[in-house]
């Protein structure tokens, strides 16, 4: 049974074929030593953006543009992705990836800085989807800011929610695992949200704001 589950998980991760710009952005991520979202998570993000008919999307963690490209594929034509990262070099690589995919410069807004410094400056109720790919120690604060930013019916998405398969094991008590476990519980129990925990990648926690 366990082997079948592992095979099914691998199948779902490879079910959607990545575009060439996404593959190139993934290669750049390896050069920088950063871990972008896997294809299964990317496809889920594209689906969520499309289902929300997203025009305004914000993400914490630009990387080299892998998640941004997936989100932009699902967004409404002309929609704008606001992407935040503390590493300017990563954002330069992401801008190159967006350009290579034929995405106009007006469709992305890159902001350099810490997510917790930038998010409070973004407008209340103005976003259709907020995607968080940040440090576990800050994820709860990111989520609270994201809920404020989302319109009614908007989507919150947080990657790493299973944190290398440790969250499900109550014996795992390291700081990052505990932070993601507590975040999952708080999102699950928040009356403002309709949540689901998807087993793609390292876990994608998604919720719709009521």
Image (cartoon, rainbow, N blue to C red):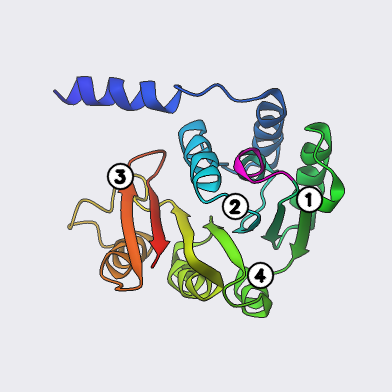
**Image-based side of 210 in relation to 169, left or right:** right
Q: CA distance from mark 1 to mark 4?
A: 21 Å
**Magenta stretch bounds:** 72-77
Q: CA distance from mark 2 to mark 4?
A: 24 Å
Magenta highlight on residue 25: no
Question: Magenta stretch containing residue 74, yes or no?
Answer: yes
Residue drawn at point x = 76 percent, y = 64 percent:
111
Q: CA distance from mark 2 to mark 1?
A: 12 Å
Measured Cα–Cα span from mark 3 to mark 1:
35 Å
Residues 174 and 103: in front is 103
Secondary structure of the residue carrying numbered label 1: helix
Quadrant location of the N terminus in the rendered image: top left
* Residue at mark 1: 107
Q: Nearer the viewer, residue 77 or 71?
A: 77
Residue that label 2 marks: 54
* Quarter of the C terminus within the rendering: bottom left
Residue behind mark 4: 114
Give the residue pinned by disc 3: 165
Q: Secondary structure at mark 3?
A: loop
Between marks 3 and 1 in the image, the one whose residue lies nearer the viewer = 1
Q: Secondary structure at mark 2?
A: loop
């Amino acid at each position: 049974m366990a082997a079948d589950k592992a095979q099914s998980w691998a199948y779902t991760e490879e079910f959607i074929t990545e575009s060439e710009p996404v593959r190139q952005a993934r290669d750049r991520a390896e050069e920088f030593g950063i871990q972008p979202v896997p294809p299964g998570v990317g496809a889920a993000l594209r689906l969520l953006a499309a289902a929300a008919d997203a025009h305004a999307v914000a993400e914490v963690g630009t990387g080299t543009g892998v998640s941004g490209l997936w989100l932009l594929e699902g967004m409404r034509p002309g929609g704008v992705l606001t992407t935040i990262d503390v590493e300017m070099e990563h954002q330069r690589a992401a801008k190159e990836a967006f350009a290579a995919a034929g995405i106009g410069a007006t469709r992305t807004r890159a902001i350099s800085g810490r997510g917790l410094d930038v998010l409070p400056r973004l407008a209340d109720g103005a976003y259709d989807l907020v995607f968080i790919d940040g440090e576990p120690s800050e994820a709860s604060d990111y989520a609270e800011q994201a809920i404020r930013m989302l319109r009614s019916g908007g989507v919150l998405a947080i990657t790493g929610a299973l944190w290398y398969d440790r969250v499900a094991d109550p014996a795992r008590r390291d700081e990052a695992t505990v932070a993601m476990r507590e975040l999952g519980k708080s999102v699950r129990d928040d009356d403002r949200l309709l949540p689901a925990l998807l087993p793609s990648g390292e876990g994608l926690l998604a919720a719709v704001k009521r």
